[in-house]
Image (tube, rainbow, N blue to C red):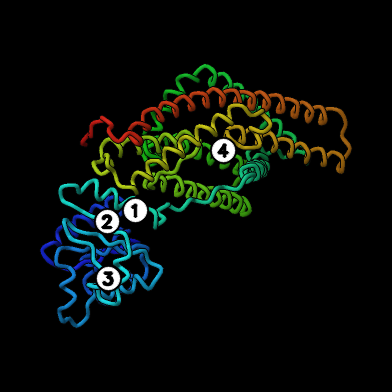
Amino acid sequence: MYRIFVNYRRGTHSMSVAALAQSLAHHFGDDEVFLDVGIPSGEQYSGEIRNRLLGCDVLLAVIHDGWLETFGRTRWKDWVLYEIATALEKPITVIPVLLEDAKPPVWEELPEQIADLSLIQTARIRSAELRSDVDNLIRRIEHHIDVDDPVPPKERAGSGRKRTGLRIAGLAFLLFLVTPVLFFDAGPLWRMFALPAFASAALLALASAFTVVTSWSLRRVGVRLDRNAGRRSHREALSRSWLLPALLVLFTAFSVSRAMTQDGGWQEWEWWYVAVIVLVTVFYFHRWWRRTTEDDDAWPPPVSPDHWVFRRAALRLHDRLTTDKEWRHPRSRKTQRQAVSVYLDLAQARQDLVDRATIPVTRWIRNGYDGLTKVYLAWFTSVVLLDLAATAALVFGDPVRGTPFRVIAITLAGAAAFTAAMVTTCFLLDRYRVTRWIDELTEWQSRLGPLIFCANESAPVQTR
């Protein structure tokens, strides 16, 4: 939408008008300043002029030397007169702009329809003082138009907690369905649930122990790798790390196939069982991939406390500030606002991380900051569900004493202990990483601040 309408009479001064419009467009944006030379081919001139005029907030009436004498000439339609008269009648701010040494119009010399133009304070544009005169005009225009960018809606408080609980519950239910298939036992009903629960708890214990040891021993290496990986786009990072998830999918498919063919072949319900799981997995993976890779091309870039996201945003902003000539000072108001907006979003992300580094473990779990923690909690929940099903089979089925209940108790105790150890490890590692992300954001702020807020920054413009 064009909110600044440039009204002028064609003549030898048209180049000065074009230069003025270009300066304003550089500051406010090309889609904010209308000059009639920008009407697309094939559009009806009169209709386009009326639409742009009625949609603007400010009309600049450019007055050159000899401007008053042009109103005495015979014309089919005097568009200059029409545009000024319409703007004076409507709630449109009119600013007379004097070119070079043009004199301000007086009431007696103006046509009756635009005589009120003489009552408005004028602005002047001179070739010798073009920069300062345009800056003064820009400040005056800014009093009459709102160029604030729309603020994206903020996420509602508490929605993250709800999603965390739902994701844990959904994954736990999925594991509850899959585990008896992977560790199928043809014995009594209670064993069909208790033994898979025991096997799942044993795997959970092994995975927890392995993760705890490797996480603490390789935490410094992990921080360095994470920082380097974050310099790539999501597409580049995912294209380099697809092998591990693919191998995991193949291993899962092989395990399911072996488990289901032990009785001689696949039954129809087993085919449908696997098909539903595959379709749900593909759907959620596709949705996650689409949302993630869309951020690579978005500008201004999204910013969040996620280390991948804020690092990519800081890198892209720094790249524009140091390599793009249009982002050098004096940059347009639009680009300056975008730069400041991203900088403030980075500052907010840093503050969010500072808050995150001080919260207790229970709130940290509810907020769902760590994906691995959600996986282990869902895993533990699935073990509990399996043991509850086994207990129900024991209580309501054939009476069995002794060993089954001890197996269930040992399974639950072991799963709870290793899950607690894993959650504690993830919590401490998250504190370790968050502290370093805060330091990284502090460093980014010290690098980006002078490039954005210092008009005489000395950073060289690099070329690719």
Q: Position of residue 173 (x, y in %)?
A: 67, 44
Front tag of 3 and 2: 3
Q: Is residue 150 left or right of residue 360?
A: left
Say which residue label 1 marks.
140
Say which residue label 4 marks.
255
Between 433 and 219, the one lying in front of the other is 433
Q: Is residue 464 visible?
A: yes
> How many other residues sit within 10 Å of disc 2, few (<14), some (14-19) or many (≥20)?
many
Quadrant where the C terminus is found in the figure: top left
Query: CB atoms at circles 1 and 3 under 8 Å apart?
Result: no
Give how far apart the Cα atoms at labels 1 and 2 are: 9 Å
* Residue 123 circle label: 2
The amino acid pointed to by label 2 is Ala
The amino acid pointed to by label 1 is Arg
- Give the residue at x 36% y 29%: 447
> How many other residues sit within 10 Å of disc 1, few (<14), some (14-19) or many (≥20)?
few
Residue closest to the far front: 108
